[in-house]
Amino acid sequence: MIFDDRVHPIECVSMAGSGAITSVTLDADPCVWLGEDNVKVELDTNVVLVPSVMRILGSENYNGMRTIYARDTNDISIKGKFVAETFAGTETLTPTLAVGVDIRVFQVDLHLSAVGGAVEDYTITKNHKDAGGAVYWDTAVHTEAMNALADYIWLPTRPYIVPKDFVLDFAYANTNNRIWGLNIFFQRSV
C-alpha cells in the first residue's frame, strides 16, 4: 500500500439519520427513474437524512456507495445510472464505508442531537466485503458508550488501515432516537 498526499487528499464521507445506526431494508418495489442520473428507491422505514452517502447491498444494479440527495416519507433519491430493477425486499441500505481500494482512516466523528441517555455502545467494525455475514472476518475496531455523550471523535493513534476487500460498518442502537451524523475522514492508496 502506498499513500501519497499529492495524489489523494483526505476525503470525508458523511451520513446522517434519525433512528438506529443500522441497516434499513429496501421495499420490494421497482426503482423509479427521476431523470438524468437520479433514481428513487423505496425503503421499509425512512430514517435517513440528507445529504448522506451510504452503501446499498444485495441489489443487482445499485450495489455500492450511493449519494442520497433527497428523501420523502418512505423513499430516498440517489445518484446513479438508471437500470430497471424491482427489489426483492432483501436488499439493504447500510451505514458502511466501502471504498473498494486500500484506505487509511484518520478520524471518525459522531454527533448526536442530545446526550445518548441510554447505556448503549456505538461500534465501528471492520468486515470482509464478501464474507456473506461470516463473523470470523469481523474485527471490532472501536466501541464507545454513548449514554453520557452527544459528540464523540475517534482518533486512532496512527491512521487505521482498511484493505480494499474490507469495509467499515457503524452501529448504534439509539433507543432515544437522537438525530445522528457521522463523518469519516480517510485517504485512498495510490
Image (spheres, rainbow, N blue to C red):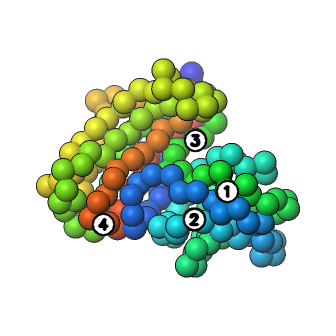
Tell which tag, 2 or 3, sits nearer the viewer.
Answer: 2
Crowdedness of circle 2 by 10 Å Cα count: few (<14), some, many (20+)?
some
**C-alpha span from label 4 to label 2:** 20 Å
Q: Distance between the residues labelled 2 and 3?
A: 22 Å
Mark found first going from the N terminus, 4 or 3: 3
Instruction: Indicate whether 74 appears above or below 56.
Output: below
Q: Is residue 13 left or right of residue 85?
A: left
Determine the image quadrant of residue 98.
top right
**Residue 33: quadrant of the picture:** bottom right
Q: Distance between the residues labelled 4 and 1?
A: 27 Å
In the picture of the structure, the residue carrying the numbered disc 1 is: 89
Label 3: how many Cα within 10 Å (few below 14, some 14–19, many 20+)? many
Number of the front mark, 4 or 2: 2
Q: What type is the residue that disc 4 sits on?
A: Arg
Which amino acid, by three-letter code, is at mark 3? Ala
The answer to whether residue 47 is above or below residue 171 is: below
Q: Judge by depth and name the residue closer to the eye, 46 or 99.
A: 46
Q: Say which element carries label 3.
A: loop
In the picture, the disc for residue 44 is 2
- At numbered mark 4, what does the secondary structure look like: helix, strand or loop? loop
Viewer can see residue 78: no
Circle 3 residue: 98
The residue beneath circle 4 is: 178
Residue 142, visible in the rendered structure: yes
Q: What residue type is labelled 1?
A: Gly
Do the numbered discs 4 and 2 sit on residues whose CB atoms are within 8 Å? Answer: no
Q: Residue at the location (65% across, 63% down)?
A: 27
Residue at 57% over, 65% down: 44
Residue 168 position within the rendered picture, expressed as x and y whole percent measured from the top left: 48, 38
The CA distance from mark 1 to mark 2 is: 8 Å
Q: Which of marks 1 and 3 is nearer the N terminus?
A: 1
